Image (cartoon, coloured by chain):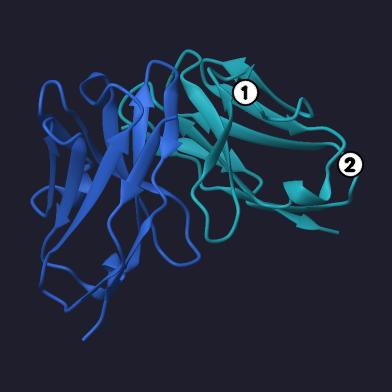
Chain colours: A cyan, B blue
Amino acid sequence: DIQMTQSPSSLSASVGDRVTITCRASQGIRNDLGWYQQKPGKAPKRLIYAASSLQSGVPSRFSGSGSGTEFTLTISNLQPEDFATYYCLQHNTYLSFGQGTKVEIK
Amino acid sequence: QVQLVQSGAEMKKPGSSVKVSCKTSGGTFSSYTISWVRQAPGQGLEWMGRIIPIFGIPNYAQKFQGRLTITADKSTDTAYMELSSLRSEDTAVYYCARGGPTGTDFWGQGTLVTVSS
């Protein structure tokens, strides 16, 4: 099984900040990775697919990078609606999620 | 517009089974995978298993082997997840999600399953 290690588990930030979240895969997964935002009581929403492609309708302040085993989600100019929990998800071999990162208001 | 619509909340006794449905529309059901993911209260997302309707063969996470059954009905574009021998730790929101070449794109709204005596 492919394990996804996501960090940090939580962070506090202010509106306008730049935030970076990292996922590491236990083995190479090419770019078979997506990033998801989840708000309480809602299903996850995809922000990034294929590691770095922006999902249609998602603001350009969200960006992804990486390939192989190291991946990053960056949120530039954090907005009030961005306070949520974020997950990485690999689909190279079945599915496996990172543990999640809760982005809270400082 | 692709939609995945799940059945409603369930309250179950320990030791019983639950079956949740996921009806899809707006896409080609057989060509994609349907995965089931669960989220216990206050916890992260956990992949349970999947099925590719065109083949009808499911794959399960080892944790759920023997207790989980995923099926797909191509005539109604509906996938099902049945979990047996329920225990309190199975209390969670269960999601179905569609997977394709670019990964998991559309999700159902979630179904709360509560296991309590």
Q: Amino acid at mark 2?
A: Asp
Does label 1 or label 2 sit earlier along the sequence? 2
Numbered disc 2: secondary structure: loop
- Which residue position holds label 1? A56
Horizontal and vertical percent position of residue B75 = 11, 32
Horizontal and vertical percent position of residue B85 = 11, 66
Residue name at image x 83 percent, y 32 percent? A76
The residue carrying pointer 1 sits among few (fewer than 14), some (14 to 19) or many (20 or more) residues within 10 Å by Cα, namely few
Horizontal and vertical percent position of residue B64 = 19, 50
Q: Chain of mark 2?
A: A
Q: Which residue is most to the right?
A: A16
Left or right side of A73 for B113: left
Quadrant that contains the C terminus of chain B: bottom left
- Which residue position holds label 2? A17
Labels 1 and 2 share a subunit: yes
Q: Amino acid at mark 1?
A: Ser
Taking depth in this image into account, of A24 and A52 the one nearest to the observer is A52
Horizontal and vertical percent position of residue B72 = 14, 36
Left or right side of A4 for A74: right
- Residue A74 sits above or below residue A8 on the image: above
